[in-house]
Image: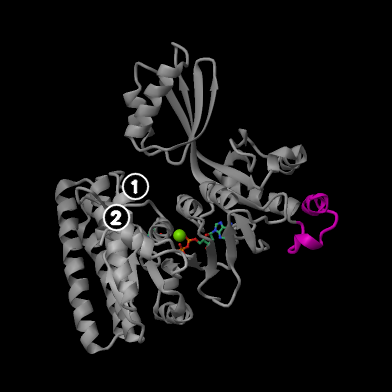
Amino acid sequence: MSAVQRQSRFERSDDVVVMKFGGTSVEDAAAIRRLFGIVRSRLGSRPVLVVSALARVTDQLLEAGNAAAAGHLGSALAIVRNIYVRHEQLADSLVDESAYSVLDGELRGEFRELESLLHGLEASCELTLKSRTLCWASGERFSSRLLKEALCQAGIKAAHVDAQACIVTDARHAGAGPVWDVTEQRLQENVIPLLESGHVPVLGGFIALTSDGVPTTLGRGGSDFSAAIVAAALCASRLEIWTDVDGIMTADPKICADAHLIRKMSFDEAEELAHFGAKVLHPATLAPAMRENIPVHVLNSRRPEGEGTEILARAKTGNLVSAITAKRKVAVVEIESAGGVDSEFLRAVSAVFDRHSCAVDLMALSLGRMSLLVGSAASLPAIAGDLRGVAEVRWENHKALVCLVGESIRRHPDVASRVFAAVSDMDVRVICQGASDRTISFLVEESNVEESVQRLHGVFFPQPEPARDWGGINSAFCQAG
Ligand code: ADP
Ligand code: ASP
Ligand code: MG
């Protein structure tokens, strides 16, 4: 049967819910047992699970790769050994003896491959993008196999689906994008028969392959994006992102203790928030959901009874400023050209940034000079080298972009003046009124980021319940609207 026929047999009315569980939602046996309860409550809606690596494993895999490439094979192997023991102990507490021996065989095979990769890295003294991807991919390969076995043991008929056999991407190793046609077809071919036979399919998030079979990842935090790809391919009726906070909040609760839950917001606003650093969603997650008009729910796996945040096409938060976020590790790049900045120059510069997979955030032009913001300075020395003779490239590190998001925030000039007033004593470098109406952002020293977000939160969300604040700017907007 062709993919098109399958698609037409499997429409939105065939309820499918895609549920993504982040690292903290599978971090230990207690978290995984909570997950069983959550999945049981969705069995009537044909759940498909997408799972991250156990909390902290991706960072540890990177640490192991770096250590091996730096010649510290012993410490690299010790890190990987600890990861293996953690998985083995989890398996031991979640599955019975016969399932354990099968699972342990699979895990040992995966770990042997990882160990030989580390030996290779020690010999080559280099952690290329490709080998970093190979290290990283193990995390989700382990967690998805473990979770499938644990679900079966808990009486939930689960089946493992190899995400790398389904999600096909371009070759950008650390932040690839899907090749949609083939990915949709493979997901439908691999997942739909399992749903039809009453299984709960389990896929590892984050990981994929190019059409030539080279491993890739969808970028840090990319399991959210994997889940959105799966949801779009299956025309799911709902995408659930299960994490460690109650939903999308007015600010990162790790920065603002009085941040409060946003119950509903639009795809557009959520996308801006994610793009400007709100880690709770990978920035690419919303596009596939938006395209297929699939509601996205962000929920707390530690408090599954909570309502969470619902993200829909036209939802409104009811506040002028919906949330405040910050993107760290930003670098400001100045590119100066003696020959002036024309379209040919812009093309040449953009080709060099593309070649080094360096995504540009914001750009300003003036006579003979461009200013850019980039999310990482790592490739700037190489970029400056490639542009030598064409332009002079200088940059400053350790900046952060603080961003206010709200549906039509730019149409209210009083917001910008309140922002200025709140941070007037700080070294504010650039005020950027975003390309859309929905953001106002400014650059500060990274060391000032927490203070600026807290101050702005105090200004725009003066009480935990802004709806009751009849004197504040948000309520003024509610009344007017
Ligand atoms: P997961 O492992 O489940 O993918 P992440 O750590 O990637 O979880 O994302 C959840 C984290 O996002 C939260 O613990 C929180 O600190 C952070 N975060 C940043 N901004 C926000 C926000 N506006 N609302 C909620 N959480 C946020
Ligand atoms: N494990 C990956 C990371 O930590 C992907 C994810 O968790 O979404 O970035
Ligand atoms: Mg995440």
Q: Secondary structure at mark 1?
A: loop
Q: Which labelled disc corresponds to residue 208?
A: 2
| Vertical comparison of 334 with 127: above or below | above
| Vertical comparison of 345 with 10: above or below | above
Q: Is residue 167 visible?
A: no
Q: Ligand 2 quadrant?
A: bottom left
Q: How many marks?
A: 2
Residue at the extreme right of the image, as rendered = 471
Can you tell which quarter of the image residue 356 is in?
A: top left
Verify CB contact (< 8 Å) between mark 1 and mark 2: yes
State the image coordinates of residue 450 (x, y, percent, origin top left).
Answer: 61, 51
State the image coordinates of residue 417 (x, y, percent, origin top left).
Answer: 75, 38
Write the start and end of the magenta stretch as one range.
462-481
280 lies left or right of 359 = right
**What residue is drawn where x is 27% and y is 46%?**
129
Q: Which residue is mark 1?
A: 176
